[in-house]
Amino acid sequence: MVEHLAGADRLRVLYSFPHPLGGPGIGTAALHQVRGLTDRGVEVTVYCTSLSLPVPGSARVIETMAVAGRRIPHRAFGTDRAYRYHDERVAFALRRSPDRYDVVHAWPLAAASTFRAASEIGVAGLRESPNAYTAVAYRLAADEAARLGVALPRGASHRFDQQRLAREEAEFDAAAAVLVPSEFVERSFSQRPGPTVRTLRHRYGFDPARFPRPDEARPDRPFTVAFVGTGEPRKGLHYALEAWHASGVAEHGARFIVSGRIVPDYLRVIAGALDHPSVEVRPFTDDVGALLRDTDALVLPSVEEGSALVTYEAQASGCALLVSDATGAVATDGVHGFVHRAGDVAALTGHLQLLAGDAALRIRIRSQVLAHRDELTWACAAAWLESAYRDARGPSPTG
């Protein structure tokens, strides 16, 4: 990572996001990246379709699909046309100002033309990869759904889409490098056929304003674990439930909270396992922090992720992690919780038993999780991202 730098070595970044900046999910992650970069003195010009939240600081913002402050939804253009329009707008801006930027950072589905323009003017084009290499992500999601006999709904992010895959392959081909948030994502690109893709590691984070440091632990509370997220095959809730019931910890008063929307066909498969006095199913909550602060451990046995934001948020809230090696969690096995191989129910079962049966272990892990809380913020993530930019750009003129 790098220290704050200014003057001749100040980075100038074009940041392309083909969605509303500050919207739910990746829109929030992108906004935090922009905020973190500007706080570090990086000169950021943002091209986004529209703004859902204001961007504080010095970032310059150009909205490509907003008129008089009103957002034009993608469906008004047609989603594919909207992506192409955004991509061409950014590519045109690059060619018009060839000396303005040092690095281009673009998110999926609207970046191929942008990267070709960046290459023409000698600027590194970096493609964000919030999930595993697309073909691998599709395969893992499809295999897990097929094993369970679940049909992925139309429009699901990980349902195979040949047109989307082709668009993303073109972006990988045109990019100078791919920004990967975890070792799992980095390894997935080794499975891509053809020329090797250069990868640059960075990470995501949590917002301390939304996830304040928790109060003291409550040893009087029953051992409580939570699954937070969409209930779908790739997230592995079925593995968590199987391990929960096999562990026997519910016989001693332990609780399992499941919070989030569950895909209907998947609910059909896991309904029996959810129907138990120790399991509480809740809808999605806007206050994830409050839920996590009242929880001992986050369980997330995903078969595919990028670097799940909830793993950062859980640790910020004092939770131990009981996660698979596909979650992209920034955590050390045995220190910040326990990591199992994706699909290994026996290992997860043992981890549940170990944590539930040892109050001193829970206290120790909580202390270790909170000790590295400050390493997991979006501010820290911005330092990683700036470092990746500098690696992509190469040595500075004064370096």
Image (cartoon, helix red, strand yellow):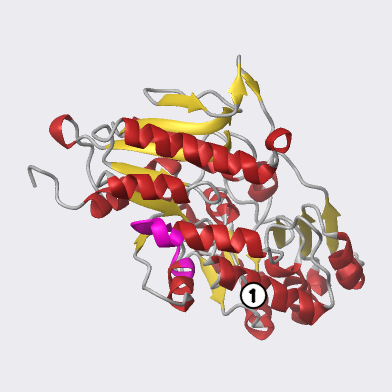
What residue is drawn where x is 75% and y is 43%? 285
Residue 350, x across and y down, in percent: 64, 81
Residue extending farthest bottom:
346
Q: Which residue matches tag 1?
A: 139
| In the displayed structure image, the side of residue 207 where residue 36 appears, left or right | left
User: Which residue is situated farthest in the left direction here?
Assistant: 398
In the image, residue 351 above or below residue 55? below
In front of the other: 59 or 4: 59
The residue segment tinted magenta is 172-185
Closer to the camera, 249 or 67? 67
Residue 179 belongs to the span the image colors magenta: yes
The percent position of residue 339, horizontal first and vertical second, equals 54, 73
User: Percent x, y for residue 382?
Assistant: 37, 43
Which residue is located at x 46 percent, y 77 percent?
Answer: 193
Residue in the picture at 62% in, 82% down: 347
Instruction: Confirm whether residue 339 shows in the render.
Output: yes
Asked whether residue 99 is drawn in magenta, I would say no
| Dot 1 alpha-carbon crowd within 10 angstroms: few under 14, some 14 to 19, many 20 or more | some
- Image: 283 above or below 148: above
The quadrant where residue 39 appears = top left
Q: Where is residue 142 in the image (x, y as percent from the top left)?
A: 71, 74
Q: In the image shown, does 130 or 193 lie closer to the viewer?
A: 193
Q: Closer to the camera, 299 or 271?
A: 271
Picture quarter containing residue 97? top left
- Asked if one can make out residue 211 in the rendered structure from this viewpoint, the answer is no
- The three-letter amino acid code for the residue at tag 1 is Arg
**394 relative position to 167: left or right:** left
Q: In which quarter of the image is residue 98?
A: top left
Residue at figure coordinates x 68%, y 43% from the top left: 79
Secondary structure under badge 1? helix
